[in-house]
Amino acid sequence: MAISYPVWDSAMFAYTISAHILLVSLSMGLAIMVTISEFLALKKKDKYYDTLAYKLSKALVIFFAVGTASGTVMAMELFLFWPNFMKLVGEVSIGPFYVEVFSFLLEAIALPMYVYFWKDFKNRWEHWGLSLAVTIGTYLSAFTVTEINAWMNTPNGFNVSAYLASGGKVITGVNPLAPFFTASTAAEELHMSGAVYYAGIAMILGYLIYKYMKTTNVPEKMIYRRGIGIAAVFMILDIIYLGATGSDELSTLLVIEPIKYAALEQDLFPVSYGAPEHLFGIIINHHAAYYLNIPLAQSLLAYPFTFGHGNIPGLVPLTTYHGVTDYGVWPPSFVHDALDLMVGFGVLMGLFWLYVVFQYFRKKDPLSQKHTLIGGMVVSFLGVLTMEDGWYTAEVARVPFIIKSPVAGGLVVNGVKYYGTMTIAQAASTDPIVFPIGIAIILFYIIIFPVTFYFAGKVMKLSNVEEDIKLGEEDIKLEEERKNRKSTPTKAGMR
Amino acid sequence: MDFIYSINFDVLFLIVVIASMVTMFASEMMAVVPIAMGFKSDKVRLNVLSYIVPVWEVVGTFFVLWLVDMENVIPILMPAIAYALFPLFAVFIFFLLIRNSLIIYAEFVWHENKYFDERKLYVIYSVATFIMGIMALSVLAALASGYGVHLYGYGKESSVPYSSSYTNFAMFYSHIQVIGFIIGGLILANGIGMVFYRLSNISKPMGRFLPLILTAIGLAIFMPSYYSLSVRDYMVNSDLIIIPILLALVIPVFYMFKQTTNIASYKPFIIIMGIISITFIELRAYPYVFGFSNNPAYIPDVITNSPMLHLAFIISVVGGIWLVLMMVYYAFVSNHRMTGLVPSGDTGNERKITKN
């Protein structure tokens, strides 16, 4: 059976982006870890924090390099594999992408200065400022790309009815500022921010715990201990934040994207009270099967303040128009299982962190307990898995559309109901060269990923701890001297 | 010339973005031959690598800026370009991945590595960059000429779907002007590169004249080729081509004299000269791209709608100013760093040369 262009293009993009978000989240996690570490080094005058920042910055520059290449591939892939989609984006919602490029430039200019000119700054706070610029740049890049994603879920900024009526030819009523603030932007941004940082820092935590368990060198242990401390505090606060924003995201979907919500929750018919929660299960012949039923749970979670009284939408009526149900616009049913997995992993990780906090208040050092350390490594793996799973849940639940309808439940134009603005098939490239190029990209990622992770690990391993700590000492001393001199503002360079 | 005065700001910004991207990438292209042929030389390592190693990350970002700005300013044209020039872009991004990965491996590779050493990795990086350069020059030649390019989905061919667009690459590369554009560009880059990286010793006659000879040969091949491939009756800005020729010659000529060697090889000076030159080269073709294709694109007809242009204007101005400030800061910090790395008087100039 031959694979179609839309399926191939989608699979390629899913593959590339799931690889790319690993690099993005790791780079974002490393950037904020480096910023916090150097800040603590300067505030507490602690050489180990400074050394930690230095070591992590080496990994950051390696992942940033491969991430930049991967990001450029993504940009080119959008342009080459999705030409019709990008044409509409170009005419309506390119604004966030345009801001994203300048954020990317902020990272790309600040990071080389931070890493390669490390020893050239007399004023260590000025040097720290560069790490802050990298953190802001990485975050803004992710923020603006998510704005586009939100626009794909709830498009605005142009006359969608006129666009659909003309068969996708006429674009009128353009408001280029509107895509910055769509109906789903706030909820998506809030959840995305926490999720990518959580996954990125989870990867770093896993590495630090592994190194902490392996090394017998006391100064090295001191460095990793500080790193684990920063990562753990961040992740504990973040998991609480993720619970709150995840719930907010689902509540937002319930109102503005009911079809997506109903698919995610496996709701086939609407209910005004007492909707059960289905754990896992699949849809066979348009009926839910093989699920575990928890009565009332969904209604109670969706409407806690009215004790479960409130409308829960259903897929069947939402996709029925003039008595005909369009099953072709139902997202693949596994998105429900993907959501359950995501929530399940989140709960497991939350329980682990609760245990760690409990141990801390019992004055027990979590780092002296082997089972807690192993638990931390498991959580680090789960953190990454949950982010990937969450991404698939959110994106696949938009299938078969690349841009959904701006109106909850679909839009009627000239007597025809449209559940989306542009389908994947309408957006995809039909140039035969997408196949060989796609295969080349697949092979390249298969090679580059393990090599890059191995390489970064090896570089970190081979860096000389004594020399790194000496550099940390010098940095702290330099800042002390500068403070004591109370001289005129110091310029960069000529250390 | 009237077209130049009436040029839309966002189009002008795009032209400057393209000029900046080409100049920044050209500075990497200038390093290809020195790295591949003379990596063991201390001079190459100090003068070339100390510049390339941090700056390659910035160069990569300019590619994305260019792409997004193109989508921003001429979205109507982009699907046709995507279909028609897909193979060139695809090869370009494939080697971009190799370039980025290998240069970062080369920076941090450990000494006892059995399979790869720093030199091998840098050489592969330079080969990848070289292939990217050929692809980039091919894309620019295709945009300027349109030889072998068939574009649909806009203008007089708007009734035919975009996906019908294609390029006959055999026809494209069979034009001597295209080959001249690519080869001339590469020779020109090497001529200017000897000055940019101060690889030529002006105390020796060969070293003194070689950058000028290479630049002159490069110009002699590149400019007539470009003039020819972008020539159509409706292209009216031909006089502008004299400006890049003069600016390109100024650099190696200044380099020959001890009094002006310093300024000629000052990197920000060459970068600015490069951006100005390429801007005028582009303006020579304006307001058309793909002039010899089945469907030449008249830029004022394919630019985006006016509300989007307003937003693009604001982002371009704010982002552009901010970008320039960041680059100035980068140049300032980098300058101090290079001062400590590059020894003075390495061009054979008796005067102290301490700033790059």
Image (tube, rainbow, N blue to C red):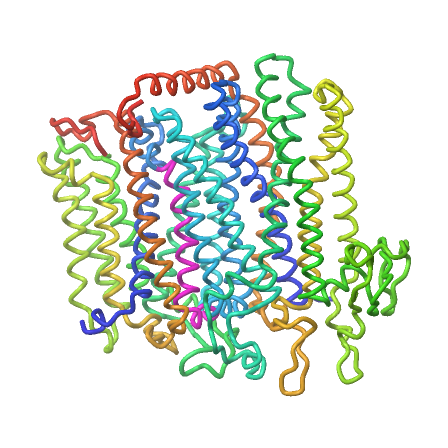
**Residue B181 relative to residue A203: left or right:** left
The structure residue drawn at horizontal position 25% and vertical position 63%, both measured from the top left corner, is B225
How many numbered badges does the structure rendering display? 0
Q: Which quadrant, please, contains the N terminus of chain A?
A: bottom right
Quarter assignment of residue A393: bottom right
Q: Which quadrant, please, contains the C terminus of chain A?
A: top left
Span of residues in magenta: B52-80
**Residue A376 relative to residue B117: left or right:** right
x then y, percent, for residue A92: 48, 69
x then y, percent, for residue A375: 75, 29
Q: Any magenta on residue B349?
A: no
The structure residue drawn at horizontal position 40% and vertical position 16%, both measured from the top left corner, is A477
Camera-side residue: A400 or B187?
A400
Instruction: Single out the residue that lies furthest toward the bottom.
Output: A414
From the viewer's perspective, is residue A127 above or below residue A187? above
x then y, percent, for residue A188: 61, 55
